[in-house]
Image (cartoon, grey):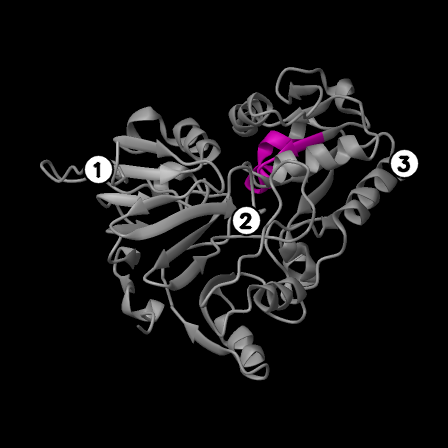
């Protein structure tokens, strides 16, 4: 019996990518009855789903950002590598290396295997489990940095630039713009690894997620609120804040701040200049061009579906390698590194009354 091609059982609907035999959506764009969530960023984890399946860490992040009642009426934690059967589809979650709890969705149905990457990176990150490649028939990949110009340097090199700047300008506050979920905690952890053991001051928007990371066993060291210390305490200090806050009047409390930003987009000098960034730090939680191609090679997938990002360039590169590429053109996913979105602004409305379903499982 010939295994069914994944295109016969994975469909793109207005709500998002739908696994038909399993009866669930993957990172749906609006409230649905059954959702499998790859990670906690608000363009992938929307509010108002009836039943939600994700890693325990992702569910904790969703509750912290949305509130208990909006993170799914029924929440089903599924640890990494633990298989579950949904409507005949065997599914498991495998580390994606993007942020704490981020997972690839591995699905097998009647001898056919598809893997949805979610957002992912291949560089080392002390705050989350590393990406694990899975061989498959179809690999669904992101392509946020799907152009050859994007080649990320080692993150330790970029942290070294920050520490060198602190040596050159010991009286200036170094204000680092970093996304509140994942990037901020990674920058803090990398600073600790590099030997920075002084207090790190954080914007209030980071406090709850940093506390959650600590509760999950990620050590971040001495963190203090950036709102209560006297101005002289910030002399020569590091402050971490959401990117939008670095251009706000909030920064007036600091001593002639050096504005830094940690993002893969800092590779584009004009983008850094337009944002008023004095110290660009190319630290990304997405795979760069080389890592996209090497990951696809590791999956040994003869066919690759490309979601959000630079689809055309990657598909062309795949064609040169005799790999069939297809653009899914899913609309509604944003790069969290490009803007600090407010979760409530992207949240979906709750489901209509009477549309509740059981948890995402075929067995108690």
Q: Quadrant of residue 328?
A: bottom left
Residue at the image point whose x is 74% and y is 37% from the top: 190
Which of 246/44 is in front? Answer: 44
* Location of the N terminus (image quadrant): bottom left
* Label annotation for residue 54: none
* Residue 125, above or below 307: above
Rendering coords of residue 282 (x, y %): 71, 52
Q: Earlier in the sequence, mark 2 or mark 3?
A: 2
Rendering coords of residue 36 (x, y %): 35, 45
- Report if residue 29 is visible in the image: no
Residue at the image point whose x is 33% and y is 74% from the top: 2
Rendering coords of residue 178 (x, y %): 62, 41
- Of circles 1 and 3, the one toward us is 1
Q: Earlier in the sequence, mark 1 or mark 3?
A: 3
The residue that label 2 is drawn on is: 96
Dots 1, 3 in contact, CB < 8 A? no
Which of 94/198 is in front? Answer: 94
What is the CA distance from the residue labelled 1 to the residue labelled 2? 28 Å
For mark 1, give the secondary structure: loop
Q: Is residue 248 magenta?
A: yes
The residue that label 1 is drawn on is: 350
* Label annotation for residue 167: 3
What is the CA distance from the residue labelled 1 to the residue labelled 3? 51 Å
- Magenta residue span: 239-251
* Residue 364, above or below 21: above
Rendering coords of residue 153 (x, y %): 76, 56
* Residue 63, above or below 229: below
């Amino acid at each position: 019996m010939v295994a069914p091609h994944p295109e016969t059982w994975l469909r793109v609907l207005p709500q998002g990518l739908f696994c038909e035999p399993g009866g669930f959506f993957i990172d749906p764009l609006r409230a649905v009855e059954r959702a499998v969530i790859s990670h906690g960023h608000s363009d992938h984890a929307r509010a108002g789903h009836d039943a939600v399946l994700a890693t325990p860490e992702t569910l904790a992040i969703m509750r912290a950002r949305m509130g208990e009642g909006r993170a799914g009426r029924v929440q089903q934690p599924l640890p990494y590598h633990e298989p579950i059967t949904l409507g005949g589809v065997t599914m498991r979650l495998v580390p994606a290396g993007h942020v704490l709890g981020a997972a690839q969705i591995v699905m097998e149905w009647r001898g056919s295997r598809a893997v949805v990457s979610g957002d992912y990176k291949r560089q080392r990150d002390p705050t989350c489990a590393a990406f694990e490649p899975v061989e498959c028939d179809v690999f669904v990949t992101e392509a946020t940095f799907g152009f050859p110009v994007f080649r990320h340097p080692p993150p330790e090199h970029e942290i070294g630039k920050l520490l060198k700047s602190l040596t050159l300008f010991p009286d200036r506050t170094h204000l680092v713009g970093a996304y509140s979920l994942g990037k901020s905690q990674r920058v803090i952890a990398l600073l600790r690894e590099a030997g920075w053991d002084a207090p790190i001051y954080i914007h209030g928007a980071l406090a709850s997620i940093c506390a959650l990371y600590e509760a999950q066993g990620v050590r971040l060291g001495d963190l203090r609120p950036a709102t209560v210390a006297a101005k002289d305490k910030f002399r020569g200090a590091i402050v971490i804040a959401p990117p939008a806050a670095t251009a706000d009047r909030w920064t007036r409390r600091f001593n002639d701040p050096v504005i830094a930003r940690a993002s893969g987009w800092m590779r584009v000098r004009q983008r850094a200049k337009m944002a008023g960034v004095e110290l660009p730090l190319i630290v990304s939680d997405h795979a760069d061009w080389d890592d996209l191609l090497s990951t696809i090679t590791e999956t040994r997938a003869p066919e690759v579906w490309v979601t959000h990002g630079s689809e055309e360039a990657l598909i062309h590169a795949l064609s040169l390698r005799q790999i069939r590429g297809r653009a899914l053109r899913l609309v509604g996913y944003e790069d969290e590194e490009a803007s600090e979105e407010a979760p409530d602004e992207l949240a979906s409305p709750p489901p209509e009354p009477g549309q509740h379903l059981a948890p995402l499982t075929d067995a108690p």
